[in-house]
Image (cartoon, rainbow, N blue to C red):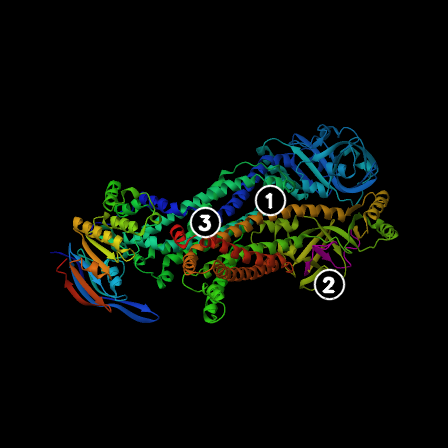
Amino acid sequence: MDKILKVENLGKTYQSAGKNLTVLNEVNFSIEAGSTVSIVGPSGSGKTTLLGLCAGLDRSSSGSIELNGLRIDQLSEDKRAQVRNEHVGFIFQNFQLLPTLTALENVMVPLELRGEKNIKGRALDLLDKVGLASRGHHYPSQLSGGEQQRVSLARAFSNSPKILFADEPTGNLDAETSARIVKLLFDLNHEQGTTLVLVTHDMDLAQKTQRIIRIKGGAIISDEFVTSA
Amino acid sequence: MESKRPLNLPWLFKMAWRDSRRNRSRLFLFISSIILGIAALVAIYSFGDNLAEDIDDQAATLLGADLVVSSNKKPSDKIVPLLDSIGNDRSKEQSFASMVLFPTAGGTRLVQIRALEGNYPYYGEIETEPAAAGKTFRQGRDALVDKTLMLQFNTKVGDSIKVGELSFEIAGVLNKAPGQTGLSSSIAPIVYIPFRYLQKTGLMQRGSRVNYKYFYRIGNATQVEKTLKNISGKLEKEGLDYDTIASQKKDTGRSFEDLTQFLSLVGFIALLLGCIGVASSIHIYIREKINSIAVLRCLGLKGWEAFLIYLIQIAGIGLIGGIIGAAIGTLVQQLLPLVLKDILPVAISSNISWAAIGQGILLGLVISVLFGLLPLISIRKISPLNTLRVVHEGASKINDPLKWLVYALVLLFIVAFGYFQLDGIKQALIFTAGVIVSFLVLTGIASLLVWMVRRFFPTSGSYLLRQGLANLFRPNNQTLILIVTIGLGTAFISTLFLVQDILIKRVSLSASGNQPNIVLFDIQPEQKQEIARVTQANRLPIIQQVPIITVRIEEINGKTAAEVKKDSSSKISPKAFGSELRVTFRDTLTAAERISEGKWRGNTDKDGTIYVSLEEQYANRIRVNVGDTLTFNVQGALVPTIVGSFREVDWNRIQTNFRVLFPKGVLEDAPQFHVLITRVPDSKASVSFQQQLVQKFPNISVIDLTLVLSVLDEILTKIGFVIKFMAAFSIVTGVVVLIASVLISKYQRIQESVLLRTMGAKRRQILIITALEYFFLGALASFTGILLSILASWALAKFSFKTAFAPDLSPALVLFVAISMLTVIIGLFNIRGILNRPPLEVLRKDL
């Protein structure tokens, strides 16, 4: 199977109070297209930093990242933006919907950015899939947390991404809503054949992916495939 | 990867529109800051445009003829045949100041007598009541009397007026003579009499100061030009002045440039305040948009695309602000002619000036974009990583070369705009430097405050005080932006108050105490003793009695007017030769004079060298230096002199002051008249003294300064009203900017206040914390602003108005309290919603 993400000798160091703070050190792994992977670890272990680097949201201090065959660590910020628009989807713990746009408009944005036409129908279909077809004209502040995360799911899949990064997607939700969101996430992922990279504390959620990468102190401490997934 | 994505402008417009939907009220706050500034400028520009057009349209009626030749000395016999041969129709007038007597009312008053012959005016008319009197009064022994005089002496048409030794029947009330303003009629009211009775009045004696005017109807402008080409040389040679409709347009326009320029400057300040408002509002607005922009960046939006979305939004809002401002300005412009009509020579129309409206709208757009650019360009650098955690942009902000380009553009804008409003690059640069210094001082003060509060933060004491203080330096604090905004706003408003005070003090003449209030002019040498006796007999003091001699400058450093004109390298101003000068001689200086350069010599030197003393500003104007030689034409005799000194003169004192002062021993025998200055205790003594003088000495003129002062006071009140009216624009804009800045800052504190509320903070506690934070900000900013304004006003007083700086600081104190309190009140107003609604509802709705 093709590798959609290849990370080699990845390192990230921050300047803090005049001192160098190494958050990630010599991280190596690769992810096959269409697979589901979770990155788990305690708070401050560097997992969100790793997600940000892999998704091209930040620049690494050392090493290389190849996403869908492109060395994104060598691209300019605008080129990385284009890569994200064409190949990447995001789901955030705090939903990150644009507050000034309706639910429908939030879903349409990635497609509009690509300059695609007749997208309203597609966005409505996605909203329908997450059970919010009738709430398309509502603003985020008029939706519950679970509803906002469902809109966020619809948005993440709207541009048919090759890879989807989810940062604690159920972190702000109750158990019942979380279960619904997780089911939707995996169903859509399966339907579209997207690669899924999850960052989570929740081991139950991690167990649902095919592979679990454990990280601690900025380094991978284990990388194992889940047989039951 | 696919090829580079093209810029999708329609989508960017769509996003700008969508994003604005939930922020309309906040966006309105941006434009509220610039609306009033634009309104002020559109009103002033429209007024200026209408004034220029009206002067163009009415120049002919201002002059009343195609050509007017004038002189304040009798034209020589040589030139009279030429004067009698110009044009198709001609009229003449001799005018002079004289006392007149109203026998019915028994009162006297100094007026301007105009003896007229011919059909003048050829354009417009002498406006009278009844209307026909303007033409018919020339047929009998009739007079036209200014309406203010008629009212003052309760006189009606048909009554008589005594001019010199002759009585005239009042044929009509003079409402308006060609070119006359409401103002000039109050100071020197006009009385028209037929020319043929002039000699019989007995007022045309030697030494009388008479103005001679010849009016001509010639035809069209080309014929006027042709005629002038033939005669101008001869007229100039004889020392005669001439005016045509074209030159009248130019001169009138020029005299009102100062007025429109001053008003424009006030409008400019209002607009600059608006700019500060725009910059601070957009700065805070963009700070709140960081998360949304980061999300869009995550979804694939490029840095420049994000920048363009908000640029479109801000430009759109600026455009709307410009349109609203232009509309309000056009309405206000309808009021300006009503306020200013008495000081303008032409009737002002209130036509809509599309050029002014266009300028206003364009300004709204340019200002919003330019002053919004600083925060806007930082959008390009917002990292998508902000979706995962807060990212602090550090050095990249400072190193962004575009930021420096925007700073340069903003400075260029202020300099360029200042240049057009202040009419001089030096003034514009000083103004811009002042703005920069104020900005830097306020930034420094804000940084110092943050440092000091952090450094000396109290470890014990009231939690509320510590929380209020901590808000000044914690992340997301608004210390810098609010101190700079409120401080600059206060500095502008306070400067306006202080300058207004300086201006009013500068022009106010004190009529109180023992100041002189009666001036007698045109006293002939042989009348000098007798008038002094009459004055003393009336138990009135002779405060000053000085001889006055009329002279002209013939040569400067050996060069005549013609030679100076020809010599393009000459620094001497040709204007020096044009006008007649009234000079005096004495051996001492008065209390109103001080030597600023050179040495004062009160007597002629032993070797016969005559050292004159020039008033320093006059010397500057004609561009001569101490040591230069001046040859004066003293009514035919040439007197060579050397400029011995310059004097600084306090013109505000009620006494005779002179541009040129001769030493004793030169002009004693020259033809001269005298001026006597005295003080009458009350109006009864004034009337009695004036009546005795008019009866015994009909040729002398008496100026009752109490009357002039009351007229001046009325004029100053009107001008003061205009100043205050326009200043109100700046002040209201300042308040709007303050409200906008503080209102927008609410979003910085709302989350924390809600959190405190959630943790059980009482209403009173949140109110105190908020009030303390805003009080610290408001008080420090307004205090610094006022200090800056005192510095600016001192500089203006010393270098621009050249006057002593003794400001009345009470308005500044009121301003300090008002702005501090206003900041606290708006701050508290901001959090009222948090106190009255459940925390979750606030977070959902307001964030």
Residue B592 coordinates in the image, percent (x, y): 72, 59
Can you name the residue that lies furthest to the front here? Answer: A176
Q: Residues within 10 Å of mark 2 (few under 14, many from 20)?
A: many
Marks 1/3 in contact by CB < 8 Å: the verdict is no
Residue B685 coordinates in the image, percent (x, y): 84, 48
The earlier-in-sequence mark between 2 and 1 is 1
**Which amino acid type is shown beneath numbered disc 3?**
Phe
Residue A55 is inside the magenta segment: no
| Numbered disc 2: secondary structure | loop
B166 relative to A121 in the view: left or right: right
Residue B824 coordinates in the image, percent (x, y): 52, 57
Badge 2: chain ID:
B
In space, the residues marked 2 and 1 are separated at their CA atoms by: 40 Å
Above or below — where is B321 with respect to B219? below
Choose mark 1 or mark 3, whichever is in front.
Answer: 3
Can you name the residue that lies furthest to the left here? Answer: A1
Residue B810 coordinates in the image, percent (x, y): 63, 58
Marks 2/1 in contact by CB < 8 Å: the verdict is no
Can residue B75 be seen here? The reply is: no
B847 relative to B769 in the view: left or right: left
Residue A119 falls in which quadrant of the image? Answer: top left
**Which amino acid type is shown beneath numbered disc 2?**
Arg
**Which amino acid type is shown beneath numbered disc 1?**
Phe
Nearer-the-camera pick, B488 or B80:
B488
Disc 3: which residue? B30
Nearer-the-camera pick, B449 or B611:
B449
Numbered circle sitting on residue B256: 1
Q: Which residues are magenta?
A: B645-671
| Numbered disc 1: secondary structure | loop
Magenta portion: prevailing SS class: loop
Pointer 1 and pointer 3 on the same chain? yes
